[in-house]
Image: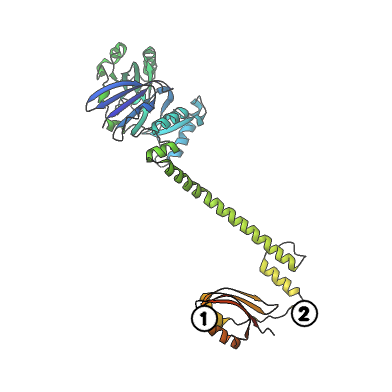
Amino acid sequence: MSLYIAHILNINTDSINVYEQTNSKSSMFNISSLAELNILNESDRLLVLIPSSTVTSYEFEENKSLSKQINIANFISEVDSTFADPVSNNDYFLHNNAAYVVDKFFLKNLNTSLSELNTNIYVLPEYLINAVEGNDVITEFEGRFMISYSNKTGFALDHNSLTQYIEIVLNKNPNFNPLIFSTNKDLLNRFGEKVKNKSFDISSIDLSDINNLPNFFKLQISLSLFSKKMNLSKIQIAISLLALFIVMAGPKYLIYKNNTNAKIYSSSTFSIFKAIDKDVNRVIAPKSQIDQILEQLPESNFYSVELPNLDIFLKYGANYISDISIDVNTSVISIKINSMPDFQFNILKNNAERFNINIINDDLNSIDGFINGILKVGYRNE
């Protein structure tokens, strides 16, 4: 397992100093794109330091009884008047009573690039590289001065701005007495008794300390990332997309189909009512309306129809009958028979008259002892 520290030198992320630590050995190299870190594997750790110009930090005490979103909203309401850009242009992070306002577009592009890497990633402000719990710290690193305060806020500046910035801090807080990791003469003269080490050793970074700091990394899911992480073939990607389409489109199709059937039902119901009574304009309660229409019809329009008793056919031949149609006007029944054994058909034929059913025509074929065809029978309808 190796620890890599990538220090982004500008907001274009086209110049990055990378430090590699493996088995107490350290090396440094420069890259122009984060994609060059694709050599890292799952067991490695990558610490990404972003420019202080992309992040502003504030002291803010969270209300633990409120949700993270409400705490962020409360923080924004307190400090939004100090923002140079619209509130929506930033991402917000709360961690250990500190709030961090990060350039949203910079961070999104950064996280998109980092998501392509197959390793464990931490993203934090550059000035927290040497944060010491409960202490203010000034660390000289790569020609810049990283100032981290005990409240986890901080800032980074170059040599030309250091003296002026220290004066401003001391005027505001005369007791400011930071730990010093630098060879700068001004710092040594002012805070000589607090010098910890005249040079910061990057190999002294402890991952357990990093875990106590905010992490701005968020995995950016995309189709290319998904296929890469899952190691999918083109066919598997196509199948996955098809399955996703079915899952998303299925409910919409069912709703569409249900609405279509409802319209057909409504239209057909109205057509039936219109055929019965031309004065019908709307069908709201079909059962009640049909009852009202029937009550208005004269009794002379009604006549009774006695349907035939088909119990004999259903009892002995139900498994071989695929269709039965009844014409009440001609009192004729058409029965479609499929592969009925001869002996079973003869039982039906010999017992039909007992149920007032007469065979009119049997357009039937007998092949290998099985009957197939249409049997037409008549029944008495008095």
Mark nearer the N terminus (1 vs 2)? 2
Looking at the rendered structure, which numbered label has been put on residue 342? Answer: 1
Within 10 Å of disc 2 (Cα), the crowding (few <14, some 14-19, many 20+) is few
Read off the residue under disc 2: 300
Q: Which of the 4 image quadrants contains residue 272?
A: bottom right
Q: Is residue 366 above or below residue 46?
A: below
Q: Where is residue 19 in the image (x, y as percent from the top left)?
A: 30, 23
x, y percent for residue 146: 34, 21
Circle 1 SS class: helix
Residue 141 x, y percent position in the rendering: 32, 19
User: Image check: 247 left or right of 41?
Assistant: right
Contact, mark 1 vs mark 2 (Cβ under 8 Å):
no
Label 2 sits on a secondary structure element that is: helix
Query: Among all residues in the image, which is located at the extreme bottom?
Result: 354
Q: Which residue is drawn at 27% across and 23% down?
A: 202
Instruction: Give the class, few, some or many, for how many residues have Cα within 10 Å of label 1's Cα (few <14, many ≥20).
Output: some
The quarter of the picture where the N terminus appears is: top left
Q: Give the residue at x 43% y 43%.
A: 235
